[in-house]
Image (cartoon, grey):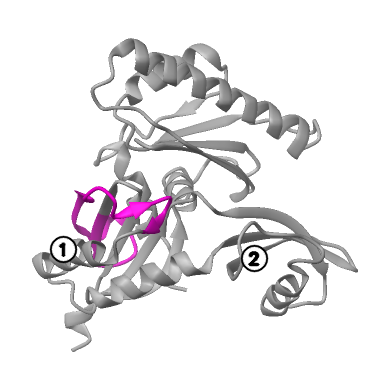
Amino acid sequence: MGLMNNGRVNIVITNQVLRYSYHKNNNVVGMVVHGEVEFPEGTIKDGAIENSGVFVEVVNELVHKHKWKRKKLFFAVPDDTVVIRQLQVPAVLTKEEAAGYVKAQIGSSFYLPFSNPAIAIEFLEADEKNRDILLFAYPNDKISAYEEAFEKAGLKPMAADLTSLSVYRYYYVSNPNQDGKNHVLLIHWNKDSLLLTAFNNHKAVFSRYVKISIDADSDEQAVRQLINEYTIEINRIIDFYQYSITKGEAQINQLLLSGDFPFMEMVKTTLTETVTIPIHHFENEKLTAKYIDVLGLALKKDS
């Protein structure tokens, strides 16, 4: 029975599509199948399930087609409402105790733009009294709705991830010699959104999500104007990171470019013309660059 249930399903959700892969184990080499399904309009809105019946039907069709019944599932949700904060907790606390401590401080020491958050923390440096931590907060109702829908479709949700973390995971696993002390800006440019996430020491320290509206049949001039506008925003975030996040002590020295934006070649050209920072394009991969998110999710450990 155990042999029949080996393997894991990995699913990345955007407002428009579901990308998936099935792996014999948690590495890219073990991939058996991958693909993408476009959602009917109105299925997902602002990163949340708008039409649960349609969503379950889409997933259920994949489960039956690929014989995924009762398979382990790892899924990544849109980063539209994630909050990343650096906080301090007493150094003596364990990770579990620190999570409880942070939850107790919500609404008094700091505030979140939503109630009932799902939180995760990462330990940073500590002295004798205090420890710096990174807090990741996400609306718990969004994650719970996904888990419930996936269970209805016959899968076994094991863990949720953020798309930005999945993409960066693939980058650092695929480039083991790159310096973790680099200040990296991920530019994850999808058809309907632009996600900018800064990483240092392999940890996400800042995130900015921007909605994008563009018609597939837009002419080249309209597309170029949109790309120029958002390139200005990218440069603004690069400056913001240097002068506000790191107080002038560091600056972005590596860019990562990923996503399913249909005019990515134009984005690459524009970025190359406007920044002097090296750009990693994920070009020399077995799959097209839009699948980097699901490949990185496949590398997430079981625990």
Q: Residue at x 56, y 36 (%)?
A: 185
Question: As drawn, which residue projects farthest toward the right?
Answer: 129
**Residue 289 locus on image (x, y percent):** 31, 37
Identify which residue, 212 or 88, lies in the foreground. Answer: 212
Task: Check the picture and name the quadrant holding the N terminus.
Answer: bottom left
At 82% across and 76% down in the image, what residue appears?
92
Residue 240 horizontal side relative to residue 189, left or right: right
Q: Secondary structure at mark 1?
A: helix
In the rendered image, residue 85, in percent from the top left (x then y), is placed at: 69, 54
At label 2, which amino acid type do we have? Ile
- Disc 1: which residue: 62
Residue with the mark numbered 2: 121
Q: Residues within 10 Å of mark 2 (few under 14, many from 20)?
A: some
Q: Residues within 10 Å of mark 1 (few under 14, many from 20)?
A: some
**Secondary structure category for the residue under label 2:** strand
Q: Which residues are magenta?
A: 20-49
Query: Does label 1 or label 2 sit earlier along the sequence?
Result: 1
Question: Per the image, is 126 magenta?
Answer: no
Which quadrant would residue 135 be assigned to in this image?
A: bottom right
Q: Is residue 69 above or below residue 170?
A: below
Q: Which kind of residue does numbered mark 1 sit on?
A: Leu
What percent of the width, then of the height, locates residue 128? 90, 68
Residue 191, quarter of the rendered image: top left
Residue at the extreme left: 65
Whether residue 301 is visible, yes or no, is no
Residue 175 is labelled as none
Distance in Å between CA atoms under marks 1 and 2: 33 Å
Of 218 and 184, which appears nearest the observer? Answer: 218
